[in-house]
Image (cartoon, rainbow, N blue to C red):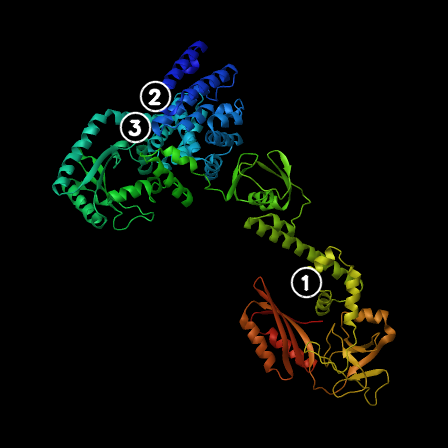
């Protein structure tokens, strides 16, 4: 191994390899490099070596040797391209600013400089210690590259690295690089149509991560290679002859699967190498017009199955019913000579092109995840790569990597990678991680610099969110976020805060009323809220919480509205039903106020705080406006009135006559069943001397709370109603409201 050699031996070996690679590269490039290019390269690289600019990488490899290997592999596996080779050989010197951008632009032009910048940005991603096993990392890499040639260089460089790290002593690093190659670079190579590179990357990845398995499969394949090739030839020969006798035009190919593909089959089928059905694969591609495709495919099927016994369980007919991605083919597995199973794929030339380069590309039906825009774009690139008549890499100069121009990809300080829409702010990022983090966000550090909530993120930013326990979401945050998640969470959090504040303010108001010994009438409170111009009750109580006005002012308005004098002829609603007349009963004491039907002469009204009805034990109270209010003896305000205003109390009783109805409120609690409400209404309507004037229902947790305003002629009728409603099945409680 190179690490066990003496320093002088390493230098000699590396110099020899560098010279050999340089000569091979010169030959591959031919006339693409001018004499001036060669002289400049030699001069700059020599100066950089003398200045100590080339530091060995983490695997101990010399950069010049690795860069030359990458450039040579590019020419062999893709295409010889002057600008790409120059970008490979000089990008490291551009990264360290040994060669300034103006100098590069002057000598090599904008195209090479652009690729160098792309390579620098892509390589910078690895400094974030991010997990590359994510779709976001791949998308960010494509975004940073900006030029597809940068991605091709990265793929070829990874292939070279994988070739060079065999038996490297740092096994953990080798394993990490191998896994990264299998789930990042190999799929990208396949999408670009670089199938040979893809296959080698997969095989090397298996070799470094499971060397025993790799060696076992390779040994078995090598032991039988000559026999296997002969077997395939013996299988194809009679099939080929029979197809020709039937006048079919075709190509027929035989192959053995790659080591990685065989291992993959073994894992899925839990079999050994010898038991893999399609270790041998034959593909028959028919040259046939579209209208005769299926007929000739089935003709070829008949020819093959006449010669070799088919396995019906392994028949896959994607001719009659193509796959959802458009893939069409006929797959059969037959028992060939020596009792070996061989898979035969039969398709037309059109079907084969679709399977390899169209919407049903091979990597799709292997289950590799994809995105529509990436698929289309990559297929376009593959078409260019396969165009041998023109310089494919020259055509790629104008291809823009704008696949993800509507998204940004940002890192956390730990290297986690997140995708957000273009225009997302630092606050969007905080909410994307967690709603609690967003609600307490006060700003952040982006690439080490302090930024505000509204900072617009850019791809590659590293974002650290700063929080405060005292921070609370605000509605104006909606103007600085673009994600629906952030918007929804902000609205939800603000509503929760408002509701909590409203509940606290409501409790505060209730305590103030209680301190003044005033029972709250919700109807009067609603009038206060309406008078102050608030659209909702929550807004009103939030105004109290934020001290927009004094609670004492609310109480004063409440008292003013509740004691407002009503005209004797004023029309009232059913809920506000009052008797308008009162006289002293003939023959009674002067200090007894008698009220009831057909009495006249005195202005009084029934108090809303207790809603007395005929038959209740009542008393009169002379208000400050001169109106006599009739209260029940058990009114919640009775003790307060007797204590503070005993001199304004009038003994009161009902006359012996009735006829008019009085408004009374009944509270009903029961199971949430619409049938109960129907039964209650029916009972009230059937009761003589009673009528239903208003009803409101509030359902919660399987229970309903009903508030019924009923008109009754007297207390006896009301008590009967309460008894009958209580007897209804499902009713849990019935109470007369104060």
Q: Quadrant of residue 218?
A: top left
Residue farthest right in this picture: 647
Residue 547 in view in this figure: yes
Residue 550 % position (x, y): 78, 59
Q: Residue at x 61, y 77 (%)?
A: 724
On screen, residue 28 above or below 404? above
| 2 or 1: tag closer to the N-terminus | 2
Which label was assigned to residue 537? Answer: 1
On screen, residue 277 above or below 668? above
Residue 521 % position (x, y): 72, 68
Which label was assigned to residue 27? Answer: 2
Q: Give the number of marks.
A: 3
Q: Residue at x 67, y 42 (%)?
A: 468
User: Does the CB distance between marks 3 and 2 fall below 8 Å?
Assistant: no
The local secondary structure at tag 1 comes to helix
The local secondary structure at tag 3 comes to helix
In the picture of the structure, the residue carrying the numbered disc 3 is: 217
**Camera-side residue of 85 and 432:** 85
**Camera-side residue of 331 and 640:** 331
Residue 554 % position (x, y): 77, 63
Q: Quadrant of residue 226?
A: top left
Q: Which of label 3 and label 1 is nearer to you?
A: 1
Q: CA distance from mark 3 to mark 1?
A: 76 Å
Q: Is residue 694 left or right of residue 650?
A: left
Dot 2: few (<14), some (14–19), or many (≥20) neighbours within 10 Å? few
């Amino acid at each position: 191994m190179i690490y066990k050699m003496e320093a002088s031996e390493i230098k000699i070996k590396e110099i020899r390899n560098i010279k050999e690679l340089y000569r091979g590269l010169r030959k591959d490039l031919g006339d693409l490099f001018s004499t001036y290019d060669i002289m400049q390269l030699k001069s700059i690289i020599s100066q950089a070596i003398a200045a100590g600019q080339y530091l060995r990488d983490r695997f101990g490899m010399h950069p010049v040797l690795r860069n030359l290997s990458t450039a040579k592999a590019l020419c062999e596996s893709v295409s010889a391209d002057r600008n790409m080779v120059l970008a490979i050989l000089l990008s490291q010197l551009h990264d360290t600013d040994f060669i300034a951008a103006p100098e590069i632009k002057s000598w090599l032009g904008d195209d090479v400089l652009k690729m160098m910048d792309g390579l620098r940005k892509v390589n910078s991603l690895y400094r974030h210690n991010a997990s590359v096993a994510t779709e976001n990392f791949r998308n960010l890499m494509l975004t940073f590259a900006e030029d597809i040639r940068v991605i091709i260089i990265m793929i070829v460089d990874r292939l070279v690295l994988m070739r060079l790290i065999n038996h490297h002593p740092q096994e953990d690093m080798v394993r990490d690089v191998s896994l990264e190659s299998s789930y990042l670079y190999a799929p990208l190579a396949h999408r670009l149509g670089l199938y040979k590179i893809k296959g080698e990357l997969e095989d090397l990845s298996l070799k470094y991560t499971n060397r025993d398995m790799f060696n076992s499969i390779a040994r078995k394949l090598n032991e039988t290679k000559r026999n296997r090739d002969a077997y395939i030839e013996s299988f194809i020969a009679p099939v080929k002859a029979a197809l020709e006798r039937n006048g079919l035009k075709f190509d027929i190919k035989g192959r053995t699967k790659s080591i990685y593909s065989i291992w993959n089959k073994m894992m899925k089928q839990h079999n050994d190498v010898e038991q893999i059905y399609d270790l041998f694969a034959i593909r028959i591609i028919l040259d046939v017009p579209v209208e005769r495709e299926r007929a000739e495919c089935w003709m070829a099927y008949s020819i093959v199955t006449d010669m070799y016994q088919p396995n019906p369980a392994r028949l896959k007919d994607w001719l009659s019913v193509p796959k959802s991605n458009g893939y069409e083919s006929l797959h059969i597995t037959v028992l060939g000579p020596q009792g070996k199973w061989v898979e035969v794929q039969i398709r037309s030339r059109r079907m084969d092109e679709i399977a390899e380069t169209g919407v049903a590309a091979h990597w799709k039906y292997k289950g590799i995840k994809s995105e529509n825009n990436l698929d289309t774009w990559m297929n376009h690139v593959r078409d260019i790569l396969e165009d041998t008549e023109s310089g494919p890499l020259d055509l790629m100069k104008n291809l823009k990597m704008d696949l993800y121009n509507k998204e940004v990809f940002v890192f956390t300080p730990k290297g986690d990678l997140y995708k957000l829409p273009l225009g997302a702010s630092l606050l969007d990022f905080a909410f994307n991680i967690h709603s609690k983090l967003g609600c307490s966000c006060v700003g952040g550090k982006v690439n080490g610099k302090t930024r505000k909530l509204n900072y617009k993120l850019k791809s590659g930013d590293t974002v650290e969110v700063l929080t405060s326990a005292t921070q609370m979401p605000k509605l104006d945050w909606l103007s600085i976020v673009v994600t629906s998640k952030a918007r929804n969470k902000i609205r939800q959090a603000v509503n929760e805060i408002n509701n909590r504040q409203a509940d606290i303010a409501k409790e505060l108001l209730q305590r103030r009323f209680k301190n003044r010994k005033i029972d709250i009438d919700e109807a009067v409170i609603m009038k206060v809220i309406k008078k102050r111009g608030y659209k909702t009750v929550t807004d009103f109580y939030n105004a109290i919480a934020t001290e927009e006005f004094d609670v004492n002012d609310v109480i004063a308005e409440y008292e003013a509205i509740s004691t407002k004098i009503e005209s004797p002829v004023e029309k009232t609603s059913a809920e506000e039903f009052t008797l308008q007349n009162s006289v002293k009963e003939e023959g009674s004491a002067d200090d007894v106020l008698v009220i009831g039907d057909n009495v006249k002469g005195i202005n009084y009204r029934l108090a809303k705080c207790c809603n007395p009805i005929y038959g209740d034990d009542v008393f009169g109270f002379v208000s400050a406006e001169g109106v006599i209010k009739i209260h029940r003896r058990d009114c919640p305000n009775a003790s307060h009135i007797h204590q503070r205003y005993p001199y304004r109390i009038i003994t009161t009783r009902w006359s012996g006559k009735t006829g008019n109805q009085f408004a009374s409120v009944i509270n009903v609690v029961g199971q949430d069943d619409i049938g109960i409400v129907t039964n209650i209404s029916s009972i009230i309507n059937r009761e003589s001397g009673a009528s239903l004037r208003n009803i409101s229902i509030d359902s919660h947790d399987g229970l309903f709370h009903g508030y019924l305003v009923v008109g009754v002629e007297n207390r006896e009728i009301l008590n009967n109603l309460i008894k009958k409603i209580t007897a209804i099945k499902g009713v849990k409680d019935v109470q007369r409201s104060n």
